[in-house]
Image (cartoon, grey):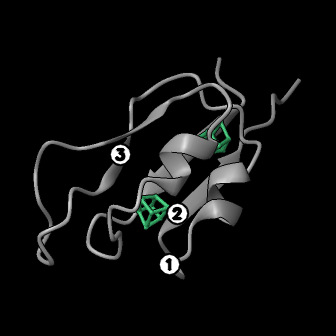
């Protein structure tokens, strides 16, 4: 099971790509589609997030990225 989960806010994203470059396991990408501002928003590839939070700190847009760190319940 992945250690983290990331959600990008498609409508707040300006498509700068900083999170895509910053993510160590490279699990973020810019989507092919456009948002309402005409940017290609970042999206999660769907697996491999470690919950490190680096993308959250890299993003200049408030509310652009939400990271959840998942813990295993014994
Ligand atoms: S939390 Fe870490 S591993 Fe997950 S998408 Fe962000 S930078 Fe990548
Ligand atoms: S860093 Fe933020 S604004 Fe830039 S592409 Fe990623 S989610 Fe979008």
The residue shown at (49%, 43%) is 20
Q: Position of residue 45 (x, y in %)?
A: 39, 30
Numbered circle sitting on residue 19: none
Residue extending farthest to the top is 1
Q: Nearer the viewer, residue 3 or 40?
A: 40
| Neighbours of disc 3 within 10 Å: few (<14), some (14-19), many (20+) | many
Whether pointer 3 and pointer 2 mark residues with C-beta atoms closer than 8 Å, the reply is no
Whether pointer 1 and pointer 3 mark residues with C-beta atoms closer than 8 Å, the reply is no
The image shows residue 59, relative to residue 67, as above or below, that is below
SS at mark 1 in the image: loop
Whether residue 74 sits left or right of residue 71 in the image: it is right
Residue extending farthest to the bottom is 62
Whether residue 36 sits left or right of residue 40 in the image: it is left
Whether residue 52 sits left or right of residue 21 in the image: it is right
Q: Earlier in the sequence, mark 1 or mark 3?
A: 3
Q: Which residue is mark 3?
A: 43
The residue shown at (11%, 59%) is 34
Label 1 beta carbon less than 8 Å to ligand 2? yes
SS at mark 2 in the image: strand
Picture quarter with the N terminus = top right
Label 2 beta carbon less than 8 Å to ligand 2? yes
Q: Position of residue 3 (x, y in %)?
A: 72, 29
Give residue 9's quadrant in the image. bottom left
| Neighbours of disc 1 within 10 Å: few (<14), some (14-19), many (20+) | some
Q: CA distance from mark 1 to mark 3?
A: 15 Å
Q: Position of residue 22 (x, y in %)?
A: 63, 45
Of the four image quadrants, the one with ligand 2 is bottom left
Numbered circle sitting on residue 65: 2
Q: Which residue is mark 1?
A: 61
Whether pointer 1 and pointer 2 mark residues with C-beta atoms closer than 8 Å, the reply is yes
């Amino acid at each position: 099971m992945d250690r983290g989960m990331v959600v990008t806010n498609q409508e707040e994203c300006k498509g700068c790509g900083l999170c895509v470059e910053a993510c160590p396991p490279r699990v973020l990408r810019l989507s092919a589609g456009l948002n309402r501002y005409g940017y290609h928003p970042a999206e999660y590839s769907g697996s491999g997030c470690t919950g490190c939070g680096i993308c959250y700190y890299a993003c200049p847009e408030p509310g652009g990225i939400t990271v959840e760190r998942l813990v295993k319940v014994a």
